[in-house]
Image (spheres, helix red, strand yellow):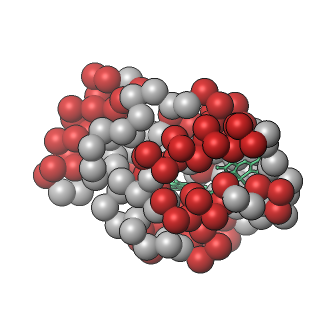
Amino acid sequence: MTTSKKLKWALGGGFALAAAWAWADGPLIPAQVLPLYKQECAACHTAYPPGMLPAASWQRIMTGLDRHYGSDASLEPAQVQQVSAWLQAHAGTYKRVREEPPEDRLTRAAWFARKHREVDVAVWKRASVKSPAQCSACHAQADQGRFDERQVRIPR
Ligand code: HEC
Ligand code: HEC
């Protein structure tokens, strides 16, 4: 971890929700997570931090919600607009996410592989994990945007 990152973690400690996004190497983003995002985009998986994907990836995801990774995640046009605007405003703040990963999956980004290189391939397939996209299987506070390695617990 770089010194500036450590400092951000330390500084973040006192700010609850704001701190939740402090791992992103950029400005401290969403002090407030859009309620609609929490409501609609965390029903089937973690509310992924918008800073973990670049704007172009979010754009594609939000224009194809009816065929969303094998699911139908459609929303009303007005809701799509609201969520899109929020995602665009906070996209790609983590320094290495200019890269548009395959299938617009943050789990296929280079940084994701690097952060998880110690996780055995078989672990991702455990029934208790299901897939790398289920961040909260191992990061209990993923929905608050917290991925601190001290809080990681891999389920059996
Ligand atoms: C009806 C369920 C459902 C809803 C609602 C839903 N998703 Fe998903 N989403 C999925 C499934 C299923 C996957 C694939 C997960 C996997 O591979 O294990 C996925 C994957 C993703 C991924 C890629 C994760 C990865 O592998 O890196 C992103 C990003 C994403 N969803 C964003 C959103 C956003 C933004 C919304 C709200 C507009 C949303 N999702 C709403 C079901 C849903
Ligand atoms: C099978 C369990 C597991 C799942 C599922 C998982 N992770 Fe992790 N993650 C880990 C482990 C273990 C580490 C810590 C590796 C280490 O000790 O450096 C980690 C580390 C991280 C880190 C680095 C934290 C730091 O302090 O540097 C980030 C960021 C992260 N994960 C994000 C995610 C996101 C986003 C998802 C979901 C899309 C996810 N992880 C899904 C196990 C998991």
Residue at the (23%, 57%) spot, across then down: 1
Vertical relation: 116 (above or below) 22:
below
- The vertical placement of 54 against 3, above or below, is below
Q: Residue placed at 17% from the left, 42% from the top?
A: 7
Q: Is residue 129 visible?
A: yes
**Residue 142 appears in the rendering:** no
Q: How many marks?
A: 0
Residue 122 point in image, percent of width and height: 67, 71
Residue 6 horizontal side relative to residue 88, left or right = left
Q: Is residue 50 above or below residue 22?
A: below
Q: Is residue 114 left or right of residue 47?
A: left
The percent position of residue 156, horizontal first and vertical second, equals: 68, 52
- Which residue corresponds to the image point at 64% horizontal and 73% vertical from the top-left? 103
The part of the image, by quadrant, that contains residue 65 is: bottom right
Determine the residue located farthest toward the left in the rendered image: 3
Q: Position of residue 118 (x, y in %)?
A: 46, 68
